[in-house]
């Protein structure tokens, strides 16, 4: 804006001349008008920032001019010229928005001061306007930025695959993103600002939140935990969740929980286990073929000897050959049974049984082989092990495998000075658990063997083992919810401990 | 006196079968159930032929074969390897041992993969020692 443009309005020609001359010499661009009407026209045309007007004029007087100017442009600096001692008019003018007044006769110093003030005000106003504009701009930008950030965060929460659930400080749900909708199977409209977390979350999660709210900062965040969410009319969802309190300074303002859907991961895990099992079978078919070849050799050998026995009417040969045939038929059937058990998923069949009787039966079955090899079978059955409900076939199979392994470990032992012994123990343990323990003082296992015994088709028995026995046992024990532990020292022997949960006999 | 044949196999079925085949064909069988006793019998008795299994506990046939072939008094006894594993696998294991610094040893006279027919076994034995 041109700050040195002045509109000078006075009906007295001499004053106009004198003042305009003196103002021009001070560097102002002066427009003159001889009446109020003329002055307004000039103002509209030139829009000067400063107007100097006489008050007393015929027609439209200075006060009128002032009012109209201020109406048109309130920022205009209007200085009024008053008659000598006419204080009332001056005060009126100031009331209507004049910025200053000068008395007649107009003294140059007074005018100079008034103009200077007017100019200063203009400058300040100009600065203020620029500043305000700037502020508005900055405000606009800042708001835009905040909005963008909040939009971004909003989108972040909305588009997260994880369920994000936030509550206020009272535990009322305030954020419930689409991920949470999917996981919980509920629309956000039904929960946001309506539901407390305790009503929605599974009990374990709700407890974690309650504890977190109660203990505040002391506890810190809740790390990842796995829980299952039960949805109405829909399948359960396995999830893992973590939770944190939200603070504003020291004050708790709410909480947030993150839920990750584990269904896909769980499904893949199960598939992996399945495919690993299939791969294990596939990879070791060669090993299996070797084992079958041995059986076949036994069968062929048996029939050959039987034939000789028949030809020569030799009962001894017949018996020997027939024994071989029988033994190898047995080997084939146990191999097939192992393979089937290993490759098939099976749930335990709970029946009432007496575990000690099952174990006794196993000991009796193995007694013959043990005696042939000068091995003693020592029984130590816990008297508190009474009738229970568990899978008796599984127990029988597991124990038979372990006892027969223990007998083999004694046969394989090079140390002939030992009195070889296999001890079979049963005990009742806390939490409805029965512990079965099979210990031998045979050859024992080194670390390498220990690490491999649950590997498919791994066998230390040359062609005699399928390399499936322990693997099958492990699978059966796990399916029964039990555990299997091994202690072994080379030359000292091995102990296998199987713990199986049982139900009350009915 | 009939010729003596040592059979080394941990599988009792194979042992009995081989023993019977040998008896039926007029040989005297000697039986060992692992490489260790096999080697001891070979040294004590000096059999005319050895029929050896590869996969056995204690001392495997792979090791026993090397011992036989590196022992001055035993290296000329013909050996039949009778095994469930493929000949290729057996030879590779021998090559591996040779590479590890052991001296190179000759291939077995005959390698038979299980299962073996009685007639095949009898004729192989006859072919080697008559």
Image (spheres, coloured by chain):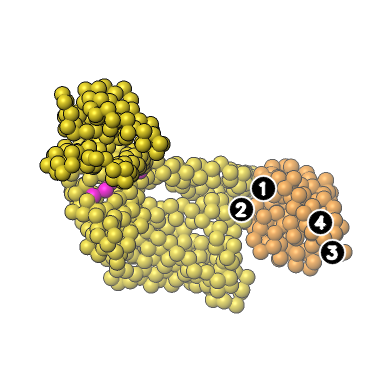
Q: What residue lies at 33% left-to-right and 25% top-to-bottom? A: A46
> Can residue B11 be seen in this snapshot?
yes
Which numbered circle lies on residue B71?
3
Instruction: Report the residue that reaches farthest toward the front.
Output: A14
**Crowding at mark 2 (Cα within 10 Å: few <14, some 14-19, many 20+):** many
Q: Which residues are magenta?
A: A162-167
Q: Which chain is yellow?
A: A
Share a chain, discs 4 and 3?
yes
Under circle 1, the secondary element is: loop
Colour of chain B as rendered: orange
Please say if B96 is above or below A288: below
Please say if A401 is above or below A113: below
Under circle 2, the secondary element is: helix
Q: Which residue is mark 4?
A: B98
Which tag, 4 or 3, sits closer to the chain's start?
3
Which tag, 1 or 4, sits closer to the chain's start?
1
x, y percent for residue B84: 67, 48
The main secondary structure of the magenta stretch is: strand
């Amino acid at each position: 804006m041109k700050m040195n443009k002045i509109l000078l309005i006075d009906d007295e020609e001499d004053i106009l001349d004198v003042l305009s001359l003196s103002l021009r010499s001070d560097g102002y661009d002066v427009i003159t008008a001889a009446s109020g009407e003329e002055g307004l026209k000039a103002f509209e045309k030139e829009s000067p920032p400063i107007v100097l007007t006489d008050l007393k004029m015929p027609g439209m007087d200075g006060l009128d001019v002032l009012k109209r100017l201020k109406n048109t442009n309130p920022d205009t600096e209007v200085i009024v010229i008053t008659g000598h001692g006419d204080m009332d008019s001056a005060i009126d003018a100031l009331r209507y928005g004049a910025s200053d007044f000068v008395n007649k006769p107009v003294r140059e110093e007074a005018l100079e001061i008034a103009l200077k003030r007017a100019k200063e005000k203009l400058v300040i106003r100009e600065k203020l306007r620029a500043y305000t504009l700037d502020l508005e701009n900055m405000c606009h930008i800042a708001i835009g930025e905040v909005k963008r950030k909040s939009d971004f965060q909003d989108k972040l929460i909305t588009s997260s695959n994880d369920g994000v659930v936030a509550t206020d400080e009272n535990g009322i749900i305030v954020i419930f993103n689409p991920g949470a909708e999917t996981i919980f199977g509920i629309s956000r409209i039904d929960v946001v600002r309506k539901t407390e977390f305790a009503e929605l979350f599974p009990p374990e999660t709700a407890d974690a939140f309650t504890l977190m709210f109660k203990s505040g900062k002391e506890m810190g965040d809740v790390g990842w935990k796995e829980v299952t969410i039960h949805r109405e009319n829909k399948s359960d969802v396995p999830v893992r969740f973590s939770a944190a309190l939200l603070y504003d300074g020291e004050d708790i303002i709410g909480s947030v929980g993150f839920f990750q859907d584990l269904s896909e991961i769980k499904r893949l895990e199960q598939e992996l286990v399945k495919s690993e099992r299939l791969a294990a079978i596939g990879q070791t078919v060669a090993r299996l073929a070797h084992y079958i070849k041995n059986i076949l050799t036994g069968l062929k050998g048996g029939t050959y000897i039987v034939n000789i026995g028949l030809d020569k009417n030799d009962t001894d040969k017949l018996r020997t050959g027939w024994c071989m045939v029988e033994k190898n038929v047995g080997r084939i059937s146990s191999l097939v049974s192992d393979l089937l058990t290993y490759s098939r998923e099976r749930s335990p069949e709970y029946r009432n049984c007496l575990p000690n009787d099952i174990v006794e039966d196993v000991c009796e079955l193995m007694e013959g082989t043990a005696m042939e090899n000068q091995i003693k079978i020592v029984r130590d059955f816990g008297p508190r092990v009474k009738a229970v409900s568990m899978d008796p076939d599984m127990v029988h199979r597991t124990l038979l495998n372990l006892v027969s392994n223990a007998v083999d470990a004694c046969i394989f032992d090079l140390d002939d000075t030992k009195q070889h012994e296999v001890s079979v123990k049963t005990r009742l343990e806390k939490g409805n658990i029965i512990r079965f323990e099979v210990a031998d003082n045979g050859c024992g296992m080194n670390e390498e063997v220990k690490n491999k015994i649950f590997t498919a088709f791994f066998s230390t028995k040359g062609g005699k083992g399928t390399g499936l026995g322990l693997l099958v046992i492990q699978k059966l024990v796990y399916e029964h919810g039990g555990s299997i532990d091994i202690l072994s020292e080379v030359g000292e022997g091995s102990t296998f401990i199987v713990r199986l949960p049982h139900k009350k006999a009915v | 006196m009939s010729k003596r044949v040592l059979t080394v196999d941990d599988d009792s079925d194979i042992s009995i079968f081989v023993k019977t085949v040998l008896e039926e064909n007029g040989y005297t069988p000697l039986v060992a159930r692992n490489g260790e006793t096999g080697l001891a019998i070979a040294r004590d008795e000096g059999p005319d032929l050895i029929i050896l299994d590869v996969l056995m506990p204690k001392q495997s046939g792979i090791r026993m074969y090397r011992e036989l072939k590196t022992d001055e008094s035993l290296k000329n006894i013909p050996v039949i390897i009778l095994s469930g594993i493929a000949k290729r696998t057996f030879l590779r294991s021998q090559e591996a041992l040779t590479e590890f610094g052991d001296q190179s040893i000759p291939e077995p006279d005959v390698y038979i993969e299980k299962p073996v027919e009685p007639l095949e076994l009898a004729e192989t034995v006859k072919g080697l020692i008559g």
